[in-house]
Image (cartoon, helix red, strand yellow):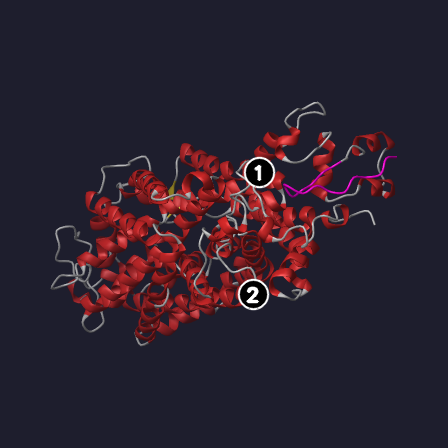
Amino acid sequence: MCLTTASEKFPCLNKECLKVTSLEIPGQDTNVGKKTQLLDRGQWANKLEFLLAVAGTLVGLGNLWRFPYLCYKNGGGAFLIPYILFLLTCGIPMFFLETAMGQFTSQGCITCWRHFCPLFEGIGYATQVVIAYAAVSYIVIQAWAFFYLFSSFTAELPWASCRNTWNSEWCVESGKSNVSSNWTAAANSTTPATEFWEKRVLGLSGGIEEIGSLRWDLALCLLLAWILCYFCVWKGVRSTGKVVYFTATFPYVMLVVLLARGLTLPGAINGITFYLYPDPKKLVDPQVWMDAGAQVLFSFGICQGSLTALGSYNKYNNDCYKDTFVLCLVNGGSSFVAGFAIFSVLGFMSYEQGLPISEVAASGPGLAFIAYPRAVAMMPLPQLWSICFFIMVILLGADTQFVSLECLMTSITDMFPTVFRRAYRRELLLFCLCSVCFFLGLLLVTEGGLYFLQLFDHYVCSGNNLLLLSVCQSVAIGWIYGADNLYDNVEDMIGYRPRPLMKICWLYVTPTVCLGTFLFSVVKYKPLKFNKTYSYPTWAYALGWFLGLLCVLLVPLWIIFKAPAGPHNSEKEQVGWKIDEWSNILLLFVGMDPKSLSCLILPEIFFPFFLFIEDVPLVSGFTSKKKKKR
């Protein structure tokens, strides 16, 4: 065989030498890595806490407004085809991989790589950059929800009528078409919900160049959201495990109620038809596939470290294989049901305004803050329904947010356990982290903040970087560490060997699909537009690409930083591996055995370049067997 896995080259990489009770982290006190110290990290009190915590972070705001928005943007039901394909080939396999990595090592998403592939620890840092961006930006949606919640305590919902100071002459209330006989034909006609969103809540400026002033009411709501997240996370899994019993279940109750109401509205059937009917022409648009892959990776927490962090608090023998299918089914089903709730309301709005569904509520990420408010305003006791709905939105955002913070905290404390696993130091670190994120997020509550939010969402929190990180992660584990090796680890934990489909996806399907989608999107690249009309300036596109590529570049930069520059590098032993030449890095990457190169059709001049490996342990603290002297 010309191609071999790391498990064949390095016999020490098996379950016997990788028992979780003997894990040690390079650079830390050896006493810290013992099992007694790992117990101080905390564990889930029971399996239900883990399931609810993961379900809470997965079933979040993305299911409520991002998934329906992507369906709307990409032609309705056509989006479901690439979404399901990515779910089966990338979402489920990568979900299982990351959860298993965390559970096996009982470490966060950075330090766990030191036990699998130290050379690819940059993947861990890259995922933390992604989740840090998400933590700063997506909590702004909670701030919007708080603003709507407080606005609901009025005699009349402010987005139900045009009798407000911020309304324009083009504002038309639903059911009052007699105000103007041709109001449906007026190009500038708007609804009260749209004007409340754009004029009262956002104070939306004309473009990203016009940052405008700070919206102080939104800034206070943002501060409140961060305070809520702080107290959900400050005691770690011991507190979050109890909070999720409410925060992860209550949103489902409200979603079912709102779905039932939406299906009873006139015109709802048109929205459902638009949602389910696939447009084959959309399948040739690379952006549809790009959005589908990004939505699966983002909504399932792939390449963000949250699954690894949450899995690290599991008991060693927890059946993470079965958990994967249960949680993926819950997440995918929730997105699908939320789409019914959204599109039933869009069908009603289309019916009321006499416009095609494709032209209704074209407000980007603000879709849920226009469609849903209109729906609750038409129910009996609208204030009550509005309060319940926006509490649901806040809880959905809080679940995702405090898991993101917990992931960041886990990574930092696992890297420096002797510093932060002491009394009150975790709370102090969390306070500093929340404070920095709050001040960074103030940019997003300015009059031009929504433009920045969409820029971050498109280039950083989704898109190319998640696809490339998925390729790196699947290659690092599937080929370098060895898919069979990880199967051995999983078997040691759960007592049986998973079906080979996961392994096939890690080795071939996932990297091929993700890389193919990335290349396809690059060839067919289209600049981002706001509401399909506003084009960002050149500097904004450059900023988006820079922030997005910064995440991915951490992977090769880490390899360059840690890999030795030559055979006389005295620091090689300090990082736990010996590599004589850069050629060996290529060998490790493709998973080849030097002895097998003779069967490849290569010029003879290259053979000496590949014959330098002496001792290359891919797992820190463990060395492979010495090769016999030639």
Disc 2 is placed on an element classified as: loop
Disc 1 is placed on an element classified as: loop
**Distance (Cα) linking label 2 and label 1:** 29 Å
Of helix, strand and loop, which mostly describes the magenta segment?
A: loop
617 is within the stretch colored magenta = yes
In this view, the residue in front, 64 or 629, is 629
206 is within the stretch colored magenta = no
Query: In the figure, is residue 320 to the left or right of 205?
Result: right
Query: In the figure, is residue 561 to the left or right of 391?
Result: right
The residue sitting at 33% across, 71% down in the picture is 253
Q: Relative to residue 27, is residue 285 depicted above or below?
A: below
Q: Give how far across and how far down residue 185 sits, in percent.
A: 27, 59
| Disc number placed over residue 208 in the picture, else none | none
Dot 2: few (<14), some (14–19), or many (≥20) neighbours within 10 Å?
some
> Can residue 459 be seen at all in this image of the molecule?
no
Q: Which residue is mark 2?
A: 319
What amino acid is labelled 1 in the image? Pro
Counting labels gives 2
Judged by depth in the image, the label closer to the viewer, 2 or 1, is: 1
In this view, the residue in front, 263 or 25, is 25
Q: State which region is magenta.
A: 615-630
Query: In the figure, is residue 554 to the left or right of 443?
Result: right
- Say which quadrant the C terminus sits in: top right
What is the quadrant of residue 626 in the picture? top right
Dot 1: few (<14), some (14–19), or many (≥20) neighbours within 10 Å?
some
What is the quadrant of residue 350 in the picture? bottom left
* Of pointers 2 and 1, the one earlier in the residue sequence: 1
Q: Which residue is mark 1?
A: 26
